[in-house]
Image (tube, rainbow, N blue to C red):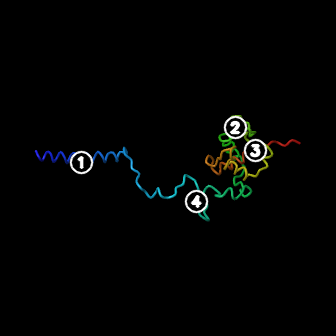
Amino acid sequence: MRLLKQLSVVFSVIALLAGVLMLFAFDIIKIQWVSFMGLQPSFGDMEEPLPPPARSIPIQGPVYLIELGPEALVNPVPANEVSVARGAQLYAIHCAMCHGPEGQGNGQIAAFLKNRPADLTSAVVQSKGDGSIFLTISLGIQGRMPALNENLTVRERWDVVNYLRTLAQPTTP
């Protein structure tokens, strides 16, 4: 009889300890543990990114596009039929909805935008250098045009630049 009482006390204590352990194991009761990870500064994605190593050659082209300036960017893609055709396809997918099929700023959603899209056939746009147009496509324009550097590769952006050159308004005498 005494042995049964001792065994019941031991099993009761074990059951109580197991129940308390389960409360913590299944996150019913959460305890904030001190960790050294919480004591260091943290940054969000691409917030204050580290500069690339000196003398490195990135696979996606120049690292410091803004610092180089548009005049330093030379179009490495020849404006042949293949490039212009690829640029036309990419323009139809990414640009025509705002700028219109002929690039006159009258796309399907242009009427719903706060700022009217640029007329890509105008002399103002066509007088810009290829590097300037490339940077505009890459980085966008704050409040007017989204950046397409995540949607288009470097080669594809140059193809769009080559296609935009074909949209120039014919000069009238």
Q: CA distance from mark 2 to mark 1?
A: 68 Å
Look at label 1 and name its amino acid: Ile
Look at label 4 and name its amino acid: Leu
Q: Nearer the viewer, mark 2 or mark 1?
A: 1
Q: Which mark is residue 166?
A: 3
The residue where tag 1 is placed is 14
Q: CA distance from mark 4 to mark 2?
A: 36 Å
Query: Residue 65: x percent and y percent?
Result: 67, 56
Asked whether 138 or 7 is in front, the reply is 7
Q: Secondary structure at mark 3?
A: loop
How would you rate the neighbour count of disc 3 (Cα within 10 Å): few for under 14, some for 14-19, many for 20 or more?
some
Residue for point 72% across, 40% down: 115
Q: Which mark is residue 50?
A: 4
Q: Which residue is outermost to the bottom?
A: 55
- Is the residue under label 1 in contact with that under label 2 (CB below 8 Å)? no
Residue for point 58% across, 57% down: 49
Q: Secondary structure at mark 2?
A: loop
